[in-house]
Structure formats: structure tokens, C-alpha cells
């Protein structure tokens, strides 16, 4: 049994540049995340070229900073983990190549980590009691999947979205509602003052096994709702920025009975219901009664509350990823790296980045 193993993690798969030092897979010694949100905001989404440049500019400074803040030197770590897949190829290459270079320079074991494995491990970092096998609902900007983990290093896919990821759907609907990017947190915030029963958006089909997931229909339903309820459409997209002015507009023929908050809350409810339904289907299909929730969308308050309630009703145990570990970070990459190294799954420096 290896003891007190300190791993450096580097994450750069998307729009967060992150480094972390983690002891024994769960104890976060230091974790730094530099978010690029402001850089991408003017474009309403992530621009890969912008992301790559920021990663390569920021990573060296973050590596310096983590040494200063932790009082530890990178040459003293026991292993180095970098996100190898999936993600934006150029973005992945920046972090992965840095991780490999450091491992080579300091003569340390190197391991490439699957980003989804990292998200799943994030829940286990807090809930170390979570038994195997367990299910994990991974809901992020790029992924909406349910996995069955037999061990920390072995998982199989149980269910996945047929089209858009849930986070992508939150982001697109937020853009339709004029709420800006990233959409998830903004939809959650505005929904707090809304009536989630105001509009009954479709929940799609659950499929015979109850595990079917699809989000493109929901996004289109919101688009049609806006179009049919007096929202101005420009370039095929409704513009709802001037809500108050429009409400006061007596020439408006279609009554504006629901506010933006009602529409957002109703959308959020439909998205959450679909996710919960697929989890319940997966519990039934696999017989596994321990369910983790992770990924950026797992920070959503309504999803957390409804999954907890579903667990109590359906008699399965729910393990929520701590909010600070839901969105992308390098702590979960270092944590997962530890599990791989402990299982003897060390990589050579030939391990390449894979976008999908
Ligand atoms: O895991 P993550 O940081 O990056 C990916 O791997 O994709 O997830 C980002 C996604 C974005 O789509 C964002 O809108 C969504 O997570 N998100 C949320 C919330 N916080 C972040 N969605 C719903 N509610 C939230 N509170
Ligand atoms: Zn992620």
C-alpha cells in the first residue's frame, strides 16, 4: 500500500486552466482554477483558438503560484496527471504536453486522465464511503451520461443523451432568453423568482427502459414558445432583452403572461425531470442503488434537491459532488491520477490527446 502520495494535476480540456496538488487521491493541498469565461463571453460560447492561447499563457504562472501558495516544489511530487481526453484538441495538448514535460524533466510517473473519470472521481473525493459498484450521472457542458463504476478505474456506459448535453441546453436556452454565457448559473438564479409550473415544456420520450435522454427537443420547444408568445425574433432568434418595455407596450397583440423567470424556471424543471427519470431508469435496469451526481450542471440547486428526493422515494443512496468540485478543476484530475497510478496504470510519454 502506497502512502501519502502527492500528485500534481493539470487540466486544460475546455475553458478552464487549472492546476492542483492532491494527497492520496482526496486531500486537496492546493487547487487553482483560472476561468476564461470573460474571454469567451463576447462570442457567446467557447472559441477554441482563444482557449488554447490562454491556456499556454496562463499555465506557467499557475504552476509558479501553486508552488508559492503550497510551499511545495513540483520536483517533490510523486506523480503527474494531465487531462488526455476528451476535450478541445488544441486545449488538451497544452496541458497534457506540460504534464508530460514536467514528468520527463523531474523523472516522475506520468498518467493521462480521462476528464469524465475525473468528474466521477470528484464525488468520491468528498464521499469516500461511496461503495462500488455505483452509478454516476455526469452532466456538463459537453456530456450527459450515466456510468456504472465497478471500481475507481473501471466504468461502463449505461445511458447517454442522443443529442445535446444538458449543460449545452442550459447555455443555448440562456442565450435565447438573453441571459448571456455561461447559461446554467444564470438560469438557476433567475428561476428562483419564477413559477416552474408556468409552462409545461415537453419531457421527451423516456424509452422502454426509461433511460432515454434527449435535450434538443426541449431547446426547440423553448424557442417555439418564445416565438409564439410575442417575443421579437431577429435572425431566427427571439430577443427578450427589453422585457419591461415590451410589457408596457399596449400595441402588443399577444399577451405576455409569463415572465422570463417563469419561462426559465419551467425550462429548468423540464431538464431536471428528464435527468431524474433517466437516473431512476438506470437504477431499475442495473439494480445498483448508489448514485453519484457530478459535472458542471450538478451544481444546479434544483437538480440536487430533486435527485435527493428521488433517492428517498426510490430507496437509492445519493452522493452529491461538492459544488466547488462540480465545474472543471485540476483537483479531480490529480485525484483520479492517483487512483490510476495506484492501480499500476501509469502511462508512457507517448500517451496522446484524444478530442472525443
Ligand atoms: O463540467 P463543466 O465545468 O465543463 C464541461 O466539462 O463541460 O460544465 C460546464 C457546464 C456549462 O454548460 C454550465 O452552463 C453548466 O455546466 N452549469 C450549470 C450550473 N453551473 C454550471 N448548469 C445548471 N445549473 C448550474 N448551477
Ligand atoms: Zn468538465
Image (tube, grey):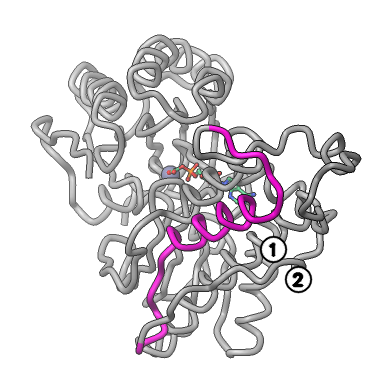
Front residue (pair 263, 345): 263
Q: Secondary structure at mark 1?
A: helix
Q: Secondary structure at mark 2?
A: loop
Horizontal side, residue 65 vs residue 99: left or right = right
- Dividing the picture into quadrants, the one containing residue 249 is top right
- Depicted 124 relative to depicted 309: above or below: above
Residue at 18% in and 44% down:
346
Check contact, mark 1 vs mark 2: CB within 8 A. Answer: yes
- Depicted 39 relative to depicted 24: above or below: above
User: Dividing the image into 4 quarters, which one contains the N terminus?
Assistant: bottom left
Horizontal side, residue 340 vs residue 270: left or right = left
Residue at 89% in and 43% down:
250
Quadrant hosting ligand 2 = top left
Q: Report the residue marked by disc 2.
A: 197
Percent position of residue 163, x then y: 34, 58
Residue at 28% in and 26% down:
99
Percent position of residue 89, x then y: 24, 30
Residue at 66% in and 39% down:
232
Span shown in magenta = 208-234
User: Dividing the image into 4 quarters, which one contains the C terminus?
Assistant: top left
On residue 81, the disc is none
Q: How many C-alpha atoms fall within 10 Å of the one at disc 1: few (<14), some, or many (≥20)?
A: many
Asked if the magenta segment contains residue 181, the reply would be no
- Depicted 130 relative to depicted 220: above or below: below
Front residue (pair 196, 157): 196
- Depicted 89 relative to depicted 305: above or below: above
- Mark-to-mark CA distance, 1 and 2: 6 Å
One can see residue 100 in this view: yes
Percent position of residue 3, x then y: 38, 49
One can see residue 81 in this view: no
Amino acid at each position: 500500500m502506497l502512502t501519502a502520495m502527492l500528485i500534481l494535476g493539470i487540466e486544460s480540456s475546455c475553458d478552464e486552466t487549472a492546476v492542483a496538488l492532491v494527497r492520496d487521491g482526496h486531500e486537496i493541498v492546493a487547487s487553482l482554477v483560472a476561468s476564461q469565461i470573460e474571454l469567451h463571453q463576447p462570442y457567446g460560447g467557447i472559441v477554441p483558438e482563444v482557449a488554447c492561447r490562454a491556456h499556454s499563457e496562463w499555465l506557467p504562472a499557475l504552476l509558479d503560484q501553486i508552488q508559492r501558495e503550497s510551499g511545495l516544489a513540483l520536483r517533490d511530487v510523486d506523480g503527474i496527471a494531465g487531462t488526455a481526453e476528451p476535450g478541445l484538441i488544441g486545449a488538451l495538448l497544452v496541458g497534457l504536453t506540460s504534464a508530460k514535460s514536467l514528468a520527463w524533466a523531474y523523472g516522475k510517473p506520468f498518467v493521462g486522465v480521462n476528464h469524465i473519470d475525473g468528474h466521477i472521481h470528484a464525488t468520491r473525493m468528498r464521499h469516500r464511503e461511496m461503495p462500488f459498484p455505483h452509478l454516476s450521472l455526469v452532466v456538463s457542458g459537453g456530456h450527459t451520461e450515466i456510468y456504472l463504476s465497478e471500481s475507481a478505474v473501471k466504468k461502463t456506459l449505461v445511458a447517454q443523451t442522443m443529442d445535446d448535453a444538458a449543460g449545452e441546453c442550459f447555455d443555448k436556452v440562456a442565450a435565447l432568453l438573453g441571459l448571456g454565457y455561461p447559461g446554467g448559473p444564470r438560469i438557476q438564479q433567475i428561476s428562483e423568482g419564477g413559477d416552474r409550473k408556468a409552462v409545461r415544456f415537453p419531457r421527451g420520450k423516456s424509452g422502454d427502459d426509461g433511460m432515454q435522454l434527449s435535450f434538443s427537443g426541449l431547446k426547440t420547444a423553448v424557442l417555439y414558445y418564445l416565438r409564439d408568445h410575442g417575443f421579437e425574433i431577429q435572425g431566427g432568434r427571439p430577443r427578450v432583452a427589453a422585457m419591461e418595455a415590451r410589457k408596457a407596450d399596449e400595441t402588443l397583440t399577444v399577451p405576455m403572461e409569463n415572465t422570463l423567470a417563469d419561462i426559465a424556471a419551467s425550462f429548468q424543471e423540464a431538464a431536471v425531470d428528464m435527468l431524474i427519470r433517466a437516473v431512476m431508469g438506470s437504477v431499475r435496469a442495473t439494480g445498483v442503488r448508489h448514485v453519484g451526481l457530478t459535472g458542471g450542471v450538478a451544481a444546479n440547486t434544483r437538480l440536487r434537491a430533486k435527485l435527493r428526493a428521488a433517492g428517498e422515494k426510490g430507496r437509492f443512496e445519493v452522493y452529491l459532488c461538492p459544488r466547488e468540485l462540480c465545474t472543471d478543476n485540476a483537483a479531480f484530475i490529480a485525484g483520479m491520477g492517483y487512483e490510476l497510478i495506484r492501480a499500476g496504470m501509469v502511462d508512457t510519454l507517448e500517451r496522446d490527446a484524444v478530442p472525443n
